[in-house]
Image: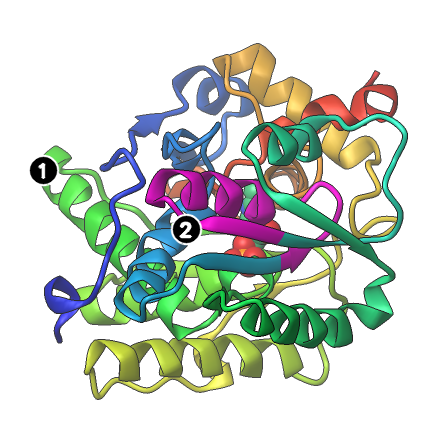
């Protein structure tokens, strides 16, 4: 493996804290709960994408790129962190966002503008074509764009979560903490791919549960195959001979509610519960949904007293302010 030899641009404050949720664990009288604070990665209000971007920006700079180009939803945390990473690395940033420009920019969208990104609005169905068009336009202007897929989820980006898993193993070793289950939200797959590969490489013995934020396909293993493919691209990038199959990827479905980005009682309840018991703020789209799912699984006895469950907080809290009405 050659992680130390890979191009990497420092963006994150690492290691992120590993904390015990003592009050909430006592209240629930179920498993011991720990939290890994990747909401505290430190770049423009933090989140999981910062770890991926260290390797993506490193790769972009190694190729002589001068512009980062990526795409996402209006409240994409990935786009906001890409805009911040570009600013820090002295690169320009072009963001392709779904839909129409709202009258008032809030949350992540406000931050994109503050961070100096150039925004392009397009219907979701046409964004692949828009990406190709923008890439060609920038090249014609003599610029050197570096394209980052949705969520930074490819083999290069997932490297950030291989490193994160190695970091967690070191923290567990140093503190003597044992973890039976790791739970996190999963959507474009790069976080899960890195965690799954990192766990294999580090010899983690517990179980990994990706809570699907936006898919409902327990039958066909399509998403599991996508995550395994990203993990395998990542292994190849690292020079590792490990290979994953869809069976190595555990995804929990059934918590999509009314769909992606639609806040319901699950998210509202989870956000208030963690805030009022531990003073930790979740987000309405990803970590709030994943934490709500975890609470439900504890209630159903899937995770039990005597076990230790680590919730990986992947960030996203800037979106809270764009959901003020739904959260009230
Ligand atoms: C806050 C937050 N958590 C979790 C995820 C899911 O991570 P991934 O897209 O790598 O599956 C995202 C992705 O957009 C996110 O912004």
Which residue is disc 2 drawn over? 182
Q: Bin the neighbour count of mark 2 within 10 Å (Cα to Cα): few under 14, some 14-19, many 20 and up.
A: some
Region in magenta: 71-94
Residue 324: x and y in percent read 80, 20
* Residue 269 x %, y %: 73, 25
Q: Nearer the viewer, residue 205 or 110?
A: 110
Instruction: Find residue 232 and report its image quarter.
Output: bottom left
Q: Is residue 242 left or right of residue 119?
A: left
Q: Earlier in the sequence, mark 2 or mark 1?
A: 1
Q: Which mark is residue 270?
A: none
Q: Nearer the viewer, residue 4 or 246?
A: 4
Quadrant for the C terminus in the image? top right
Residue that lies at the very extreme toward the front in this rendered image: 141
In the image, is the residue at mark 1 within 8 Å of ligand 1 by its beta carbon? no
How far is the residue under mark 2 from the one under mark 1? 18 Å
Regarding residue 328, the answer to whether it shows in the image is yes
Give percent across and percent down for residue 93: 54, 50
| Residue 49 drawn above or below residue 47 | below
Whether 97 is drawn above or below 325: the answer is: below
The response on whether ligand 1 sits within 8 Å of label 2 is no
Q: Give the secondary structure at mark 1.
A: helix
Front residue (pair 309, 96): 96
Work out whether 73 lies above or below 111: below
Q: Residues within 10 Å of mark 1 (few under 14, many from 20)?
A: few
Q: Which residue is mark 1?
A: 174
Q: How many marks?
A: 2
Could you tell me which quadrant the N terminus lies in? Answer: bottom left
Q: Residue at x 70, y 35 (%)?
A: 109
């Amino acid at each position: 493996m050659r992680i130390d030899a890979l191009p990497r641009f420092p963006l994150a404050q690492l290691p992120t804290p590993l904390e015990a949720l003592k009050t909430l664990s006592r209240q629930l009288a179920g498993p011991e709960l720990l939290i890994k604070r990747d909401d505290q990665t430190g770049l423009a209000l933090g989140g999981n994408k910062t770890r991926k971007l260290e390797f993506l920006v490193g790769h972009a700079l190694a190729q002589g790129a001068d512009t980062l180009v990526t795409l996402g939803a209006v409240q994409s945390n990935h786009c906001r962190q890409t805009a911040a990473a570009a600013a820090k690395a002295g690169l320009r940033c072009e963001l392709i966002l779904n839909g129409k420009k709202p009258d008032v920019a809030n949350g992540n969208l406000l931050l994109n503008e503050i961070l100096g990104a150039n925004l392009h609005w397009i219907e979701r169905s046409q964004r692949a074509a828009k990406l190709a068009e923008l890439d060609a336009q920038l090249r014609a202007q003599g610029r050197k764009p570096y394209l980052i897929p949705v969520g930074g989820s490819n083999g290069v980006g997932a490297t950030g979560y291989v490193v994160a898993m190695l970091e967690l193993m070191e923290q567990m070793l140093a503190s003597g903490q044992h973890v039976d289950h790791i739970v996190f939200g999963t959507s474009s797959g790069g976080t899960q791919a890195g965690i799954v590969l990192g766990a294999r490489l580090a010899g983690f013995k517990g179980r990994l549960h990706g809570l699907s934020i936006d898919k409902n396909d327990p039958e066909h293993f399509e998403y599991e195959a996508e995550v395994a493919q990203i993990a395998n691209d990542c292994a190849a990038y690292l020079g590792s001979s490990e290979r994953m199959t869809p069976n190595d990827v555990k995804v929990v479905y059934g918590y999509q509610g009314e769909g992606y980005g639609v806040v319901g009682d699950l998210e509202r309840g989870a956000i208030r519960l963690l805030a009022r018991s531990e003073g930790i703020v979740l987000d309405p789209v990803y970590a709030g949904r994943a934490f709500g799912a975890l609470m439900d699984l504890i209630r159903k006895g899937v995770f039990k007293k005597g076990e230790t469950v680590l919730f990986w907080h992947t960030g996203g809290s800037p979106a809270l302010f764009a959901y003020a009405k739904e959260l009230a």
